[in-house]
Image (tube, coloured by chain):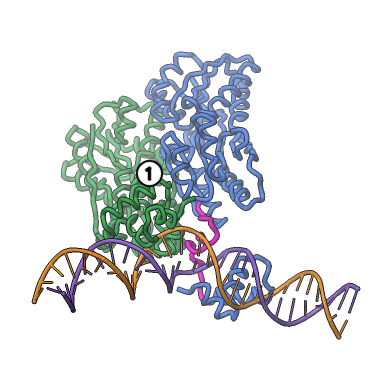
Chain colours: A green, B blue, C purple, D orange
Amino acid sequence: MPDLSDVAAVAGVSKATASRALNGSGLVAAETAVRVTAAAARLGYVPNRAARELARGRTGIIAIVVPTLDNTFFTPIIAGAQARAEEAGLQLTVAVHALDSASAVERLARQVDGFLVVAPRGSDTLVASAGAAKPAVLVDREIDGMTSVVADTASAFGTLTSRLAAEGHERIVYVGGPEGSWQDRQRTAAVRDAARAAGAELTVLGPRPATFVAGVEVTPAVVETGATAVVPYATSIGLGLLLALGTRGVEVPRDLVVSTEPTVIEALGLEHTPAIDVDGEELGRTAMDLLARQLDGQDEPGRQVRLPVPVRG
Amino acid sequence: MPDLSDVAAVAGVSKATASRALNGSGLVAAETAVRVTAAAARLGYVPNRAARELARGRTGIIAIVVPTLDNTFFTPIIAGAQARAEEAGLQLTVAVHALDSASAVERLARQVDGFLVVAPRGSDTLVASAGAAKPAVLVDREIDGMTSVVADTASAFGTLTSRLAAEGHERIVYVGGPEGSWQDRQRTAAVRDAARAAGAELTVLGPRPATFVAGVEVTPAVVETGATAVVPYATSIGLGLLLALGTRGVEVPRDLVVSTEPTVIEALGLEHTPAIDVDGEELGRTAMDLLARQLDGQDEPGRQVRLPVPVRG
DNA sequence: GGGTCCGATGGAACCGGTTCCATCAACGAA
DNA sequence: TTCGTTGATGGAACCGGTTCCATCGGACCC
């Protein structure tokens, strides 16, 4: 297993120069750099991560803190972050916190260079304190002063509601998300505004956990409103709704339009059902980008990015 | 930020002794060990992970290699492994490989101490080669000579089929899993044997990807068989089935019994529907245990563990 | 032509632990 | 009493990189 000394010896330079050449610090002669790179390639040299960490004082590890893995909204975010981390030469470790993101962060603070925090619920101050220890990027939520990236689902929910109203739906139900959810607050407000503007009658049910079971359970209440369209907070709730409606003899979309996500709607062959299309992987990639830039000193903390969310169908 | 020298100075011993005392090597006098431990606690000493790695030649990182995160079967495994890793003072990193687990392993081999490999598909030799570089535990699949832990779903599928037959179902459909899936081969065989033994007529449909959409798409073929019970390879397929059946006017479970998983069945209030109950977290925990023991030299590679899978309802 | 400045390079210290080896004291055995 | 043995401890090397500082040669300027 070759080390830096071996590479240096083969290239005919010192360890110091070899190190500089391989890290592209720009302080070596172009010709020398080529020689070192070639030597490294020929020997199959892979730097020892522990040694590098020790010398640099950085770990090269990023932790993504998520409330659970049992929610298909979070997993694409992880996948996206993972892919981008790899490109940046960073390693991603996944930490699951039931609800207490702050303690998860504290426990890992010494082990990693930075955090991607996915904390849809919990108080602002608690979540913000999580980011105090190390550079952090908040995902799908905004808090003043913290770097963040959100999918602009609120706007999309508004657009969706307007469109439903324009298609003739006069009674619409919004099934809310988990108690204390930041996104739920945004979405509720957007849906309310859009319904009011369009003159449609809106019923808000919730809060509800973002689960399949919650969708099943809320179904009777939805049917009872007499609405002709329902907008659920999450796809999982929408699936529960669809399933429970089927067993109650309510025909979708004839009797009731359920707006879930495009892939589901397409699979079921449901026509004329508008739905929002969130790109979770893009969320993850962007978050990792922001963090990487911050670690390199290219960005100041506090930047807030909003990704547009299209409405399809 | 205190380091080992500080601790040693406070305790009045050398770095060497301090190190030994904190690692419980048993070579220090009991009284000295107490003094060192107290000093460390008082200073809030946390060992530097990079330095330790460098000296020991171990990283303390385990990678779990999964094909995708978009499948609710894998995520509990990750959560379980993560919890146990934490207890063992190890860090878990998640690597997503589309289909090629071997290349993912190769890429990380230098960075980690061991692997948890979740590779339901692909050839034995390819998957086995993945484990050659570093200690590895195969999850939910068995290959001769490799340490592994599997949920004994095959037996459970057999039991399930027998029970359905005993309840009077004479025509049963098994909707198979992904092409090349090891578990699918086991389950198909078990279901076949059980059906034959009970004198029930069995139709095997597949292979099918383990997705919601695949469940929707296979529905017409299932209905066409005239079966009264269907056993899908995965919960996701079962959900697709349930949903599509609802839109086709097939009443569940009156016209057709769909065996998914207990939580779904309970949520929908479906009575008399037996289902298997796989504990994914336990799978993850056990896998991590096996790997940790192997790294400590307590276990030889090659141990194969089967977790029982209950049939409920 | 001599002095200055700059870019490229090498030597060596350093990051913070672990562990080999030597030392030393105390104890039991001859 | 003396020697060998054992247990506890300290000194120092070492893991494999990064980076500060010194050196050196050549180009440029006066």
Query: Residue A27, relative to residue A229: is it above or below?
Result: below
Residue A123 position within the rendered picture, expressed as x and y whole percent measured from the top left = 36, 61
Is residue A94 covered in magenta? no
Count every numbered label the image shows and give the total: 1
Query: Residue A29, relative to residue A167: is it above or below?
Result: below
Residue B32 position within the rendered picture, expressed as x and y whole percent measured from the top left = 65, 76
The quarter of the image holding the N terminus of chain B is bottom left
Looking at the picture, which amino acid does disc 1 mark? Ala
Using the image, name the chain to which the residue with label 1 belongs: A
Residue B53 position within the rendered picture, expressed as x and y whole percent measured from the top left = 51, 59
Rendering quarter of residue B307:
top right
Q: Which of A13 and B30 is in front in this view?
A: A13
Is residue B29 among the parts visible in the rendering? Answer: yes
10 Å crowding of disc 1: few (<14), some (14-19), many (20+): many
Residue A179 position within the rendered picture, expressed as x and y whole percent measured from the top left = 38, 52
Residue plotted at (42% across, 58% down): A101
Query: Residue A4, relative to residue A193: is it above or below?
Result: below
Residue position marked by numbered label 1 in the rendering: A79
* B215 lies left or right of B88: left
Is residue B54 covered in magenta? yes
Q: Nearer the viewer, residue A110 or D2?
A: D2
Is residue A63 among the parts visible in the rendering? Answer: no
* B168 lies left or right of A12: right
Q: Give the range drawn in magenta.
A: B43-61
Q: Nearer the viewer, residue A312 or B125?
A: B125
Residue plotted at (45% across, 32% down): B236
* B301 lies left or right of B40: right
Q: Nearer the viewer, residue A141 or A293?
A: A293
Rendering quarter of residue B278:
top right
The quarter of the image holding the C terminus of chain B is top right
Q: For mark 1, give the secondary structure.
A: helix
Residue plotted at (34% across, 31% down): A264
